Amino acid sequence: MYNYQTVLDLSYKATNLRKKLGLDESNPIDIFAVANNIKDLTLVFYDLGNNLSGLCYKDINMIVINSNHSYGRCRFTLAHEFYHYFIENSKDKMICSKSLSNNPSKEEKRADMFASLFLAPYNAFKDKIKDLTKETISVEDIIKLEQYYGLSRLAILYRLKMEGLIDGDWDKYSKNVILQAVNLGYDDKLYQKINFHNKTYGKYISLVHELMDKNIISKGKQTELLLTAFRSDLLEGDLYSDTNSID
């Protein structure tokens, strides 16, 4: 199913992108914080319905993530969109479906594999699973891996299949996912819907304030632009003023 040369090629690309973004080659990352530090990138969280995971508009430096999905799934989607944004040569708008398994596009499959390798680097992941076998791997092992790398259950199962540790019979690993994790003492954040529903971050927001500071746009236009970006919170007076205490 997985061509070894393709895995190595995408692993190399994922490692190089990590270096380019100032990250190390092996440790788990806060990919949302990484995205917010990418120059000129606008990141939008928006409810895209049931069939789409994300969108990538390379021409305007924008990535859209489906805020209706779980935190772990949104992390994977953003890494997937990084492939389209940084790696893929096409300049077309990318529309990415929800399915990890049934999309016929070769580039979408490559983007999924890249996302897995970006969030859980090849060599580091190999080291993590070195003592596991197909006969001994347990649900607890799977939960530890998905929690460590911040991957959804579906994403970690695909990765383990790629590594030959599980086969296609996933029913026993796909039930009571949240209950299994909390019973092991983990927070359920990874499996719950992300808490930024319809919100914009990054270049768009900073540009609106820059234009306002330079008197290029009016206060009314600033309000219009921020409301378009679902950022009414930035219009609430001194909500983020320096007079507020910070713990």
Image: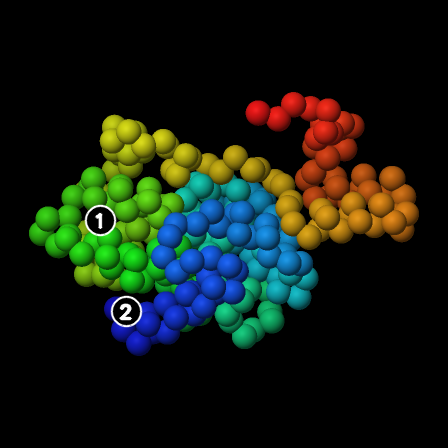
**Disc 2 or disc 1, which is closer to the eye?**
2
Q: Is residue 225 left or right of residue 130?
A: right
Where on the picture, by quarter, is residue 184? Answer: top left
112 vs 241, nearest the viewer: 241
236 vs 228, nearest the viewer: 236
Say if residue 84 shows up in the picture: no
Label drawn at residue 238:
none
**Residue 51: image x %, image y %?**
47, 50
Q: Is residue 225 above or below residue 96?
A: above
Q: Is residue 239 left or right of residue 176?
A: right
Q: Is residue 7 left or right of residue 216?
A: left
* Measured Cα–Cα span from mark 2 to mark 1: 18 Å
**For the point 39% across and 70% down, which residue is it?**
12
CB contact under 8 Å: marks 2 and 1: no
Label drawn at residue 170:
1
**For the point 19% across and 61% down, which residue is it?**
164
- Mark 2: give few (<14), some (14-19) or many (20+) Cα within 10 Å: few
Where on the picture, by quarter, is residue 45? Answer: top right
Amino acid under disc 2: Tyr
Q: Secondary structure at mark 1?
A: loop
Q: Residue furthest left?
A: 135
Q: How many marks?
A: 2
Image quarter hosting the C terminus? top right
Amino acid under disc 1: Trp
**Residue 18: image x %, image y %?**
46, 61
Mark toward the start of the polypeptide (2 vs 1): 2
Q: Secondary structure at mark 2?
A: loop
Say if residue 203 shows up in the picture: yes
Label drawn at residue 2:
2
Q: Is residue 246 above or below residue 160?
A: above
